[in-house]
Amino acid sequence: MSTDAFFASLTRIRNVILPAPVRSWLNTSRGLLTGFILVHLGFLIFGALLSLRGEAFSDTFIYRDWASAGFNEANLSGGPSPWVYPILALIPMALAGIAGPGPFFFLWVLMTTLLNGWGLAKLTDRGRNQDAIPAGWWWLIFTLLMGWLGFARVDGLTAPIVLVALAYGVGRPFIASVILAAATWVKVWPAAVMLALFAVVKNRLLVVLAGVATSAVVVALAAVVGSVPKLLNFLTQQGDRGMQLEATFTTPWLWLSVLNIGDSRMYMNTDINSMQVDGPGTAVMSVLMQPLLILAALLVAGLTFWALHNGKLNHDANGGGVDRTELLLAGALTLTTAFVVFNKVGSPQFMVWLAPAVAVGLAHSWREWRVPAAMLIAIAVATFFIYPLFYDALSHNNPLMAGVLTIRNVLLVVLFLWSVRRLYSLGKKAPASVPALKES
């Protein structure tokens, strides 16, 4: 079945399920706003109920303890250090803990909701861009499927921030770079998107200046609170960790553990609260993963530079143009996917890293981005089964859940290959029908 035939079938199924008047209403700003409220209201209510019982959820238990301890490791009884995160990640934790540990989780979910609202508003130009409404619905569906992975982890805060940065994109590179630099000081992965932005904009000095200026503000903040010596701890805190259970490259050892071959086993690394896999060769692979990730990122960045340069040559030869926005989005997706695929840390919340580029891509060109959008929905569904539904079974060598994880990891590799191919095709030819997007 061809791609067009597959999506035509999906459209026919959608039309049968949803009558035309409903589809028309959903494709309005009011319909999208209603969807946003319903999706996030469910998370807010659950967050409020847990908070009323004095509870949190998933990693927010750890964040709450850090905030209660004033982010001072001496006040903690063990477990991971708060400095496994860049310093700006501590700000939302402090804000969520401003009223004490009781309402911490609800306030955390509320902050995520507000940031998601900001991202959706920017993506759709506050509902005025009719063509972006379907992309907004895709973002909401992905958010719902990812569940608490987007509402109980730092990654869920950074995803809408990166979405906003990509929406500014090559048109406002300085603003986009400031946002991305700030997001990188919350969680490292937005650096991949910033690298893609640097590769495609005309004035790369703006990107560098924005990054330097933002980092200078962060250093000044660290100096004020006396945390400069710990500023870069996040780069070294997890360097000696092993191969995490869910990581793509861990898949062979996952099955060795499931089949009880070669003394492979799963175990909990309590120091960093991570389930890992140990077996023949895992120590060597763990050491190799960091340089492999760096190499993959450099190769993708090089491919992005090549695509821009070759597109310019095609522009001169054929009278076409380079769509820098499309190149930015393709480069951002490829780099973030590389950050996931070639990472020895395979935490399930990493899947939210992939959504911003796809959401903005759908708003930019639905037809070009429908394939990765469909793949990412499948990845989100598989991830939901892995966590939170059946993670306990997975960590106890359940072969069915190992199969689900393997399918998810294969989809990630396919998405990475699709993204690389897309980047290559953008550089190979620049269609005359696509005008160049000018920067302001």
Image: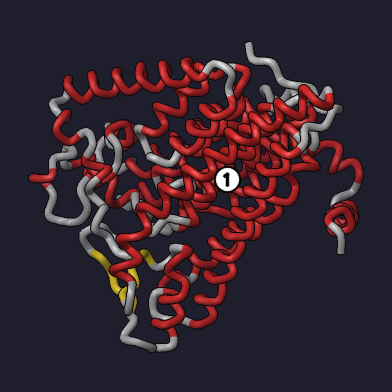
Q: Nearer the viewer, residue 96 or 99?
A: 96
Instruction: Judge from the rendering whether residue 420 lies leftward or rightward of residue 191; answer left or right.
Output: right
* Image coordinates for residue 267, horizontal then vertical, percent: 29, 73
Q: Amino acid at mark 1?
A: Thr
Q: Nearer the viewer, residue 126 or 327?
A: 327
Which quarter of the picture shows residue 234?
Answer: top left
- Residue 216 against residue 360 in the figure, above or below: above
* Image coordinates for residue 337, horizontal then vertical, percent: 54, 49
Q: Which residue is pictured at 42% across the width and 82% down the height?
A: 256
* Image coordinates for residue 243, horizontal then vertical, percent: 35, 65
Give the SS element for disc 1: helix
Q: Is residue 356 in sight in this rendering?
A: no
Which quarter of the picture shows residue 360?
Answer: top right
Q: Which residue is pictured at 52% across the width and 52% down the height?
A: 351
* Image coordinates for residue 132, horizontal then vertical, percent: 74, 32
Q: Is residue 27 in sight in this rendering?
A: yes
Q: Residues within 10 Å of mark 1 (few under 14, many from 20)?
A: many
Q: Which residue is pictured at 42% across the width and 32% down the height?
A: 183
Q: Which residue is mark 1?
A: 334
- Residue 287 against residue 350 in the figure, above or below: below
- Quarter of the N terminus within the rendering: bottom right
